[in-house]
Amino acid sequence: MLRPPQPCVYLFLLDVSYTALQTGYLQSFCEVLAAEIDKLPGDSRTLIGFITYNSSVHFYNLSEELSTPQMHVVSDVDDVFLPLPDGLVANLQGSRALINQLLEQLPTFHQDEYYKDDGSALGAALQAAVKLLSASGGRVTVVQTSIPNTGPGKLQNREDPNQRASSKPANLQPATDFYKMLSLEAAGQQIAIDMFLLNTQYIDHASLGGAARHCGGCLYSYPGFHNMHNPAEVERFEADLKRYLNRKIGLEAVMRVRCTKGLAIHTFHGNFFVRSTDLLSLPNINPDAGFGMQVSIEDNLTDSPYAAFQAALLYTSSKGERRIRVHTLCLPVTTSLTDIINSVDQQAMIGLLAKMAVDRSINTAVSDAREALVNACVDALGAYGATLGNQQRMGAVPSPYSLRLLPLYVSAMLKHPSLRLGVSTKTDDRVHAMDDCKALPLSQLMLQLVPELYPVHILTDEGGILKEDIVIPQPPRLALNSGSIDRNGAFLLDTGTYLYLWVGSAISPTFCSQVFNRPDFSSLEDGLCDLPELENEMSERLRLFISHLTDRKPGSPPLIIVREDSRNRHVFIQYMIEDKTESSMSYYEFLQHIQKQQKS
């Protein structure tokens, strides 16, 4: 790090095409940013700027001496330039009044007939952003609602809706390397690019995601976003944006991972740029990022009773302090296969297998990745079976306690949107699911793979946990199959991204009255997104339990209420991963398949 500690620099790139304005996102974005702006990490040096774009790129002069923000339009998107030498990023404290004005005006700036422009020059806006921040570094936040169709980096719709259930998903790789090369250039200037994709149509996530993947950026997706027609996505976007704006941030970071002689790290997974064999460049680092590493054994490890791994993160804090954070892990070396098997972390195992499967899907085929996952499960359980006698291997699939859920996790991964086949899956949804597998922290990925299902129609304080003198109910966790659900109950499903409350058609009128303030099931509206705050034990217990689940997460997943007879019931049912579907085996059938594979 040759230059002084980097200040926090925040640059927001906002899509103001006609399609974007129709979604209503700009009002939500400006309201959230105005409310959270005082919580942005930083100090007295913090800078902020805004760029909007349709078929032109618009810059905003926020110099302190001005009385109102000035907009400058650059129409030549094929050779974009900065219209001013100064003022396009301004000191947050010094220009606060101008920033407040701009956030109030932005939602209406582009509503005139003159601005009904459906162009999207995202590539040019990103080029301008990198130029603007090249001297300081910083974080670029992009909110994009449609496929870029103007200027450099413009894309075309590559998706064939008739092929969404194909056994050979196509277009998982970028259509152009424009966004990847821009990301690499940004990484070299200590600039991270984060993307919020709020699309209602195909947006080519595979291509656009390249802007974030190679510079330590984040990718968020909100399919079908509309402020009137999809309130759940609006709620999720606003909650994620709040978290994003006020979470801790590390700047101009590098991470080095070392291990004992005889071991070698040969593959990294996540969003970063590999500067050398063991050094990752992370222009920004945040607490919601996840990484994976593959390790190979290259020499005999019997010289030492322990093998060590160390991850060292060097970064600049939001207050301008140079810091280093070190994690060291020592593990015993053994020649006993039984000891190794009994020490396996099955969640870490499936997390890394998921990352490897995504790489294979992109580089070869999804079917190859699925086959490799099953083979990994067969090999792991087969290795354990080899340590047992013939009598112990009779009957069911032999499995140690440490790997008892591995078949379930693999079966769930085969039904995950990233790898599933034979089910209609939009290309953007599949690619985003793949990005999640690569970059989500393990705890969040596990909730996506194997959600938590709870009965909530009879909540009691028995077995609850005490928190600040309040008892929080702890209902039992149920298996993810249709047999766990009945028409007389209500069931809460936590997927990490959403909370679904399933209401059976024969639910008691008492539950409807005390929880929904409705007399019975027939009067319950489909698609509700919140619960009324009613003063009775049943309502309070359920809301306490939901708050308990959301408090454990970095964001705040929206609640969606699903009637048993809802036309959207499939959204809930798809998470019953132990059930058989037209294109996939039930969990029981999968276990039988594993058993046959071991015998063959």
Image (cartoon, rainbow, N blue to C red):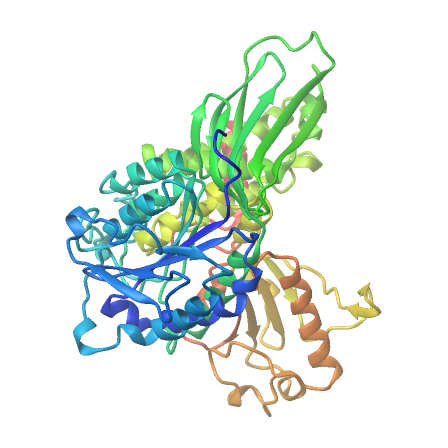
Farthest-out residue, bottom: 519
Name above or below for residue 66 compared with residue 293: below
Please name the residue shown 69% across and 8% down the image.
302
So how many labels did they put on this image?
0
The residue shown at (22%, 53%) is 159
Q: Along the horizontal axis of the image, is 43 left or right of 335?
A: left
In the image, residue 344 above or below residue 12: above
Residue 576 spot, x, y in % from top left: 52, 58
Front residue (pair 105, 18): 105
Q: Quadrant of residue 217?
A: top left
Q: Nearer the viewer, residue 116 or 22?
A: 116
Q: Is residue 48 visible?
A: yes
Q: Quadrant of residue 551?
A: bottom right
Q: Residue at x 27, y 46 (%)?
A: 127
User: In this orientation, which residue lies closer to the viewer: 507 or 363?
Assistant: 363
Q: Would you say residue 392 is visible in this rendering?
A: no
| Residue under the image location 68 percent in, 28 percent down | 328
Give the x, y percent position of residue 510. Answer: 67, 87
Q: Position of residue 476 (x, y in %)?
A: 71, 62
* Residue 209 at x, y percent in the picture: 35, 46
> Between 314 and 520, which is closer to the camera in this rendering?
314
